[in-house]
Amino acid sequence: MLGGLVQVDADWRTLLQSGLPPFIHISCNMQEAAPIAWLLEQLIAEMKSGNRPGRNVVTSGLAQLLFVQTLRAYLSHAQNRDEGWLKGFGDHRLAIALSCIHGDPARNWCLAELAKEAGMSRTSFAVRFRNMMGVPPSTYLTQWRIQLARREICAGASVSETAAKVGYASESAFRTAFKRMTGMAPGQYREAAGRTFAR
C-alpha cells in the first residue's frame, strides 16, 4: 500500500473537489496505467533510497505527476453519468473553449467566439457545455474570473487592480459579481482570508 496527500489551498480545494468523483479506479489493463505504474515504482525506489540529495524535490515532483496522470486517466474513461466540471476537459471540443477562457480570462468572451473556437454551432456548443459543465459558458467564465480574483485579493492586490486583471471594465461591476459569487464584498473577503491565514 502506498498512501499520499495532496495539499490544495481552501478555495481551490472546493473547486477541485466539485469537479471530481469521490473515487477514481485505474484498472491495470488501461493504456493510462503504464505511466502511473512507472511513477509509483520511481516513488517507491526514491523513498527506499534513504537521504539522497534532492529527495524531497524528486518525491514532490513524482507525486504531482502521479496526481496529474491519474486525472488524465479518469478523463479518458469518465462515464456519462459522472458529474463534475473537470469532465469537460476530457471532451476535446470543450477543452479548446476552456483553454481559451483559462488562457485569457480578462477577454470578453461571447458564446459565438467560444463556439467558433470549439468548431461547433452556438446552440450545440451551449447545450454541450451546460450538460457537461453544469453551467452556461458565461457563468463558468464569471466563476473562473472570481476564483482568480480571490487569489489576487489575498495576495494584496487592490480591488481596482484585480477588477482590471480579471476582465471587468468597472470596479462596481466587479464588486457586484464578486459579492454575488462569494457572499462577501472584496474587502470583507480579504479580511476573512487574513484571519484564516493568521490562525
Image (cartoon, rainbow, N blue to C red):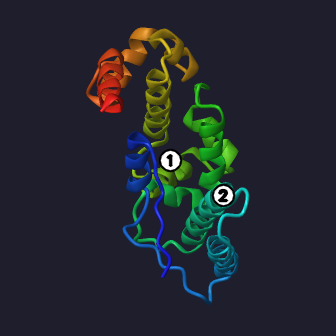
Residue 87 in the image: above or below residue 166 = below
Numbered-mark total = 2
> How crowded is the residue under tag 2: few (<14 C-alpha within 10 Å), some, or many (20+)?
few
Q: Residue furthest bottom?
A: 29
Question: Residue 130 versus residue 123: which sits nearer the camera?
Answer: 130
* x and y, in percent, of residue 147 in the image: 45, 34
Q: Which residue is at a point 49% across and 30% down the rendered structure image?
A: 145
- Residue 107 x %, y %: 61, 26
Q: Name the amino acid type tagged 1.
A: Ala
Please tell me whether mark 1 sits on a helix, a strand or a loop: helix
- Which mark, by number, is residue 179? none
Residue placed furthest toward the left? 183
**Which sits in the foreground, 58 or 62?**
58
Marks 1/2: CA–CA distance:
37 Å
The residue under label 2 is 61
Q: Position of residue 122 (x, y in %)?
A: 57, 44
**Residue carrying label 1:** 126
Most foreground residue, 131 or 143: 143
The residue sitting at 60% across, 39% down in the picture is 102
Residue 143, quarter of picture: top left
- Mark 1 Cα-neighbour bin, 10 Å: few <14, some 14–19, many ≥20: some
| The C terminus - image quarter | top left
